[in-house]
Amino acid sequence: MTSPTTRPAPHGLLIANLLAQLAFGLLTMTICLPSMQEWGAIFNTGQAAVQLTFSGYVVAYGSLQLLYGPLSDRIGRKKILLFGLAVAFLGSVLAALAPNLPLLVAARVLQGAGAAAGMVVGRAMVQDLFQGPERTRVMAYVGMAMGLCPPLATILGGQLHVRLGWQANFVVMAVLAVVLFAAAWRGLPDHQKATTVQPHWLRAMLSSYARLGRERAFILYVALLSMTTATFYAFLGGAPIVLGSYGVGPDGIGFYIMCVPGAYIVGNYLASHMAHRTGERLMMGLGQGCTLAGIGLVVVLALAGLNTPLAFSLPLMLVGIGHGLLVPPALAGTVGLVPALAGSAAAVAGLMQQMMGAVGGFAVGLFRHEGALNLGWLMLGLALCGAFAQWLLHRRPPKAGEVSR
């Protein structure tokens, strides 16, 4: 068996393959956002029911990571990834054929269950292949790639919706699942499993999670990431409704939504250059400050009666930059605290991110959104919870054995 010391260095095609696998779940999540604006009328139902297509996906996307993570540590990354892509393909086909909203929700849940494998396996492979500040740099590159997903997916999804119908979005994702399956089969390395006799997989999984649960820093990193994701998903779920109240149709939503993910790419670019020169605590503090300032500005402008698409979207560019500075070091800290449990750590982080993201996305449907004010208050409350977790994480020096951030 090849040892870690003799493993070939990652090359460009491998990294591109890894980025694509990581991005698949977010692409699948967001490509149908423009269609959600009209699903209520198409299926003759309320907006809260339509939001279940988003929240159901997100819950499945997070929950299955809890299972995929330790299984990838035990039986291999590639096997889990291939299984997940096959499930995502099936969910995409069923979604394209769904005749009513309940079946569409079920298909979206199946999509999320399959797409979860790419996120958890991709993060664990970053831990397998990179170390130290380089891991943070690669996480920043991951963030840049994933930052492209929501704007590109929503623009593509809106155009497909207008020209070919909402089902075309799911046909595209089914085709992409097949392409990524082939890319993973041919291009990704097999995970080097332990050669020692291992306990039953369920006992090993529970032991892994119990070990991580004893790490105070791990819990706080996860809480921080979860609330950050909830803030972003509240934006993704609420932006089409807010923009619709301003007269923006499905084919225009993506151009406004792209302000936040586009800025997120900028933030990740800054993080990739700051990782070796700036303390990560300072970088995370700057990120949180930008996030709160951007959301606060949206609330202030809404209170002042400035209700336009640009008054809503442009201030949130600060949120994108803030998240770009904040997320890479937080992710690196999460998977790096206990390297032997990288898959399990990525799974727990992924689960909690998606569960809280589902809460944020579903909560959007509980309020009226004739302007940006209610969404702004919701996002601000979620962001403040993340800021509190970050304050707890950094209020004392790390103990021996903890990763310094």
Image (cartoon, grey):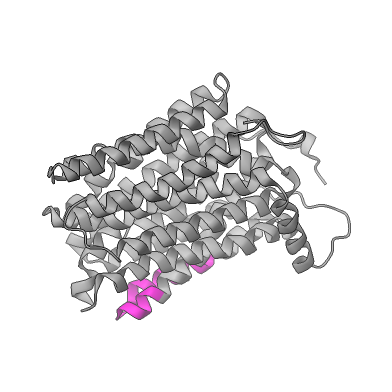
Q: Nearer the viewer, residue 21 or 270?
A: 270
x and y, in percent, of residue 273 in the image: 50, 23
Q: Quadrant of residue 27?
A: bottom left
Q: Is residue 103 magenta?
A: yes
Q: What residue lies at 70% left-to-right and 35% top-to-bottom? A: 8
x and y, in percent, of residue 356 in the image: 47, 58
Q: Is residue 83 above or below residue 128?
A: below
x and y, in percent, of residue 28 in the image: 40, 58
Can residue 293 be seen here? The reply is yes
Q: Is residue 78 magenta?
A: no
Q: Nearer the viewer, residue 300 or 131?
A: 300
In magenta, the rendered stretch is 85-105
176 sits left or right of 209 in the view: left
Can residue 175 be seen here? The reply is no
Q: How many marks?
A: 0
x and y, in percent, of residue 62 in the image: 52, 61
